Image (tube, rainbow, N blue to C red):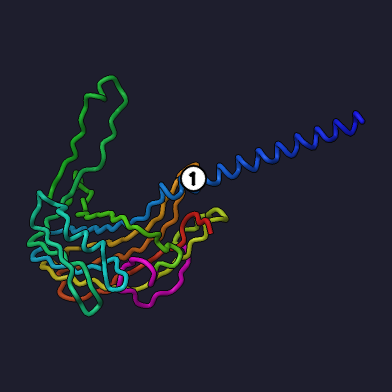
Amino acid sequence: MKKLGRRLKTITLLIAALMIISIVSIVIYVESGSQNEESYMSSYNYDISIEANGPLDNVMLYVPLPTFENKSIVGENMISRDFYNKAPEWNFSIVETEHGNMLSITNDKIIPRYQSLPIAIEEDEDSENEVSVATESHEYSEETPVIWPVDFSIMTKVNQSIDTKDPVDNALVLLPKYKLSSSEPPYDIPTPDYIEPEYYEYESRIFAQYNSSNQTSVYIRVEVNGANEWWVGGWRSNSFQDRIIIRMNGPQDGWRTAEGSMVTGDGIYDD
């Protein structure tokens, strides 16, 4: 009888322990779901970078916009925001072209800026009081070898989750996209088994019109990143990246082909 009593007591304790574990698991699950919903955020980051190693006059550029169903909330946000209140010569608008809606960027003149290389501050007693000021110039020299690009960047939050696995036709991506095809990873960097990004390449278009010397080189990068982020015992996220680049030499007056690349499905997914 005593042995039976001890067995019953042991079974009772095991059942109680299992019930406690189940309750705790349910509470953790509910709380993590609540944290997920409260912290969940989706956004697009749109960036444009322009580098010119010589003066450009009467500049007009049409660059791809993040577009979905012929609309671009990112573009609308871009033209309604005063990026350069200290440089009002920059003008933005959305224009309809033969390659779809694009962002128009105009400026009467772009003058390059070069800076010196970063100067390391030595660790000594007086280093906290030292201020390192970079040398600036409008021309390349051994003292100012680093060109300073003109950058425009904006983040736009959205109220719905972004399809980062299959953003083409389902999310805001750079358009136009011609000859879209799968490609190999640009770098041989191993990723965890639970992260399986896909890589693509394509052709896009940029309209460029400006006067310059024949020796002037212009580099333009346009990029959009779509991301979902949430908190479950730590930050998690998934994203896609869409980018085009082009380098042009001398004066321009027409459409040019740009190289495009895309990475999708980069990050953690619950499904």
Find residue 216 and report its horizontal and vertical position in percent: 17, 63
Q: Is residue 26 above or below residue 178?
A: above
Q: Is residue 104 left or right of residue 164?
A: left
Find residue 12 and report its horizontal and vertical position in percent: 77, 36
Q: Is residue 70 above or below residue 223?
A: below
Q: Is residue 82 left or right of residue 71?
A: left
Question: Residue 214 falls in which quadrant of the image?
Answer: bottom left
Q: Looking at this view, is 35 or 200 the one in front?
A: 35
Q: Looking at this view, is 73 or 134 the one in front?
A: 73
Q: Looking at this view, is 82 or 193 the one in front?
A: 82
Give the residue displayed 46% in from the left and 58% down from the top. Answer: 266
Q: Does the magenta-highlighted stretch encompass residue 177?
A: yes
Question: Residue 57 falls in which quadrant of the image?
Answer: bottom left
Q: Is residue 70 above or below residue 265?
A: below
- Assess disc 1: are there few (<14), some (14-19) or many (≥20) residues with their C-alpha within 10 Å of its C-alpha: some
Q: Which residue is denoted by mark 1 in the rendering?
A: 232
What span is in magenta?
Answer: 168-185
Q: Looking at this view, is 232 or 192 the one in front?
A: 232
Q: Is residue 241 left or right of residue 195?
A: left
Find residue 237 and report its horizontal and vertical position in percent: 44, 52
**Residue sitting farthest toward the bottom:** 98
| Callout 1 amino acid | Val
Give the residue displayed 70% in from the left and 36% down from the top. Answer: 17
